[in-house]
Amino acid sequence: NDEATKKTKEFYKDFIKGKIFSTDAKTAEMAKLTENSFRDVNIAFANELSILCDNLNIDISELIRLANRHPRVNILNPGPGVGGHCIAVDPWFIINKDPENARIIKTAREINIYKTEWVIEKIKNEALKLENKNHKKPKIACLGLSFKPDIDDLRESPALYIARKLKSYGYEILAVEPNIDYHDDFEIFHHDEAINNADLITILVAHKEFKGLNIETDFDFCGLLDVF
């Protein structure tokens, strides 16, 4: 209520330097959900473009570079999906509240979920080709497990989901995550060891430790090897 809002604002004034805005509880909650849904929608546009470009044999990096020269266009870098405990979760609260009208938000969620499955299929198809050629299952390096670069947070991570799925198909996974030392499901490798021993290298998270490495792969799903 208004009294609670006033007291909360007074409390935060003691240590917050920025401007404090007041509104009703429903609008405040919706603002939080809206921020993350907006980001989800924009990521979905980039992810959908990456799928279209793959089908049309167009360089997605070149396309984004050119399109972003327009002063009012700012296409994001596509990735293997969307993770974290905010962007991947918050849109569902809006969708659940009004599923009939939350059409763009729902579609964006579906696109970003599909992108992760699409990545898995791309890797599986290449792995099958290598298996048929070499008569053994390939070792797959998964560079990155966290849900975004340079953090150790694995919640709702599409990269972790991809690595687990590939492991469930019987592939040996050389997992590389420089921000953690241990994981229940995977042995954590240094990137040099994984790159040198893998039959197939996949880049799932653009960690700073991976930038500048001599990596030859067609399976860079986060634009690490491209400059946007």
Image: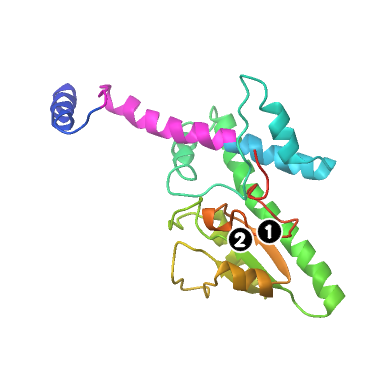
* Contact? badges 2 and 1 (CB < 8 Å): yes
Residue 226 appears at what percent x and percent y? 68, 45
Say which element carries label 2.
helix
Residue 53 appears at what percent x and percent y? 78, 40
Q: Residue at x 66, y 27 (%)?
A: 68
Q: Quadrant of the N terminus?
A: top left
Say which element carries label 1.
helix
- Give the residue type that dot 1 points to: Ile
Mark count: 2
Vertical order, 164 against 85 (above or below)? below
Kindly report the secondary structure that dominates the magenta region of the rendered protein: helix
Q: Quadrant of the rendered structure where residue 23 is?
A: top left
Q: In which quarter of the image is the C terminus?
A: top right
Comparing 3 with 198, the one in front is 198
- Which circle's residue, 2 or 1, is located before the other in the chain? 1
Q: Distance between the residues labelled 2 and 1?
A: 6 Å
Which residue in the protein does label 2 denote? 162
Magenta span has 73? no
Magenta-drawn segment:
18-42
User: How busy is the neighbourhood of tag 2: few (under 14 within 10 Å), some, or many (20 plus)?
Assistant: many
Which residue in the protein does label 1 denote? 120
